[in-house]
């Protein structure tokens, strides 16, 4: 029988790319998923220096008078977890702040509004259930955390808590209460860019957010996310970043501005038209929070 050698045995192993060691200063991690979200923040970064860790680039400097490490998480859950953990491993991160766009789920919210959710969950962590005469049923030993959407039963994720050794099943990952309080103060009187709706954009601090490795543009699932999770917004990274922050016992908060309605609008998805406005509004609130955070 012919045997074929495996790739790693014949190909040279790529060397890890890193510009370490870092400077050792306590820093706040400022994260966005992709270039349109972070561009407005990069221009305000003073004394920027770039370091490479693996495939990602991390910029250090000062933003709103605070020492930060700023980077792109990459789009979707796995990229976000990978780059956030690398930042926590290589920098002295005192808090994690995420700024970006999202799809709106709550019908009371409009494009351009900014949501600072109190907690985050993974809406596609779970099981695809077997179809039976009684409906889509999980095995007897398995429970779903919320109402199912057809065959999709969402469940908690097993994770070792920062103060333990045995895994626990956890559904929600909380934003830091002190940072939420700062966000409420920072939102007072904050001027946001108008997205053209009937009402001026607003900030909502509190409620639930959900994330998954899917660009969601489906009215049916949007309705489900609102009913089952009581979600305000839906995105592709925040729950993963919140989970990594929880596992490392680092305060976390995410600022998400609505660029679209996740399938709830009357026409084509709105993200192309309102991405810039949403990214600017999210970044504006995050910078206002940075200004009010205590110095490290």
Image (cartoon, rainbow, N blue to C red):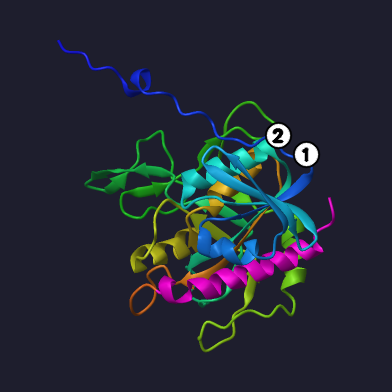
Say which residue appears at 39% left-offset and 61% top-offset: 216
- Comparing 264 with 195, the one in front is 195
Whether residue 232 appears in this view of the structure is no
Task: Establish if 96 lies above or below 160.
Answer: below
Toward the left, the furthest residue is 1
Residue highlighted by disc 2: 21
From mark 1 to mark 2, how far is it between C-alphas? 8 Å
Percent across and percent down for residue 59 are 65, 50
Task: Establish if 193 lies above or below 27.
Answer: below
Percent across and percent down for residue 121 are 53, 51
Q: Which residues are magenta?
A: 270-296
- Comparing 143 with 74, the one in front is 74
Say which residue appears at 50% left-offset and 65% top-offset: 102
Percent across and percent down for residue 54 are 54, 37
Residue 24 - label: 1
Q: Is residue 44 magenta?
A: no
């Amino acid at each position: 029988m012919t045997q074929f050698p495996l790739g790693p045995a014949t190909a040279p192993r790529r060397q890890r790319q890193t510009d370490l060691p870092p400077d050792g200063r306590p820093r706040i991690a400022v994260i966005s998923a992709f270039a349109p979200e972070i561009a407005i923040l990069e221009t305000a970064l003073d004394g920027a220096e770039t370091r490479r860790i693996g495939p990602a680039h991390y910029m250090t400097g000062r933003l709103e008078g605070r020492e930060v490490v700023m980077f792109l998480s990459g789009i979707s859950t796995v990229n976000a977890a990978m780059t956030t953990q690398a930042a926590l491993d290589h920098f002295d991160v005192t808090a994690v702040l995420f700024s970006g766009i999202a799809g709106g789920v709550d019908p009371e919210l409009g494009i351009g509004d900014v949501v600072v959710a109190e907690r985050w969950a993974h809406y596609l962590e779970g099981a695809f259930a077997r179809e039976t005469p009684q409906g889509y049923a999980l095995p007897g030993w398995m429970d779903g955390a919320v109402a199912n959407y057809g065959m999709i039963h969402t469940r908690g994720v097993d994770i070792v808590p920062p103060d333990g050794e045995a895994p626990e099943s956890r559904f929600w990952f909380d934003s830091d209460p002190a940072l939420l309080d700062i966000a409420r103060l920072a939102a007072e009187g904050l001027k946001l860019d108008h997205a053209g709706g009937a009402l001026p954009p607003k900030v909502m601090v509190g409620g639930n957010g959900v994330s998954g490795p899917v660009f969601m543009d489906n009215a049916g699932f949007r309705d489900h996310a609102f009913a089952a999770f009581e979600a305000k917004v839906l995105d592709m990274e925040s729950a993963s970043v919140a989970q990594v922050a929880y596992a490392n016992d680092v305060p976390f908060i995410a600022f998400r501005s609505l660029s679209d309605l996740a399938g709830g609008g009357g026409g084509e998805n709105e993200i192309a038209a309102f991405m810039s406005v949403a990214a600017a509004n999210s970044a504006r609130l995050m910078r206002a929070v940075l200004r009010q955070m205590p110095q490290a």
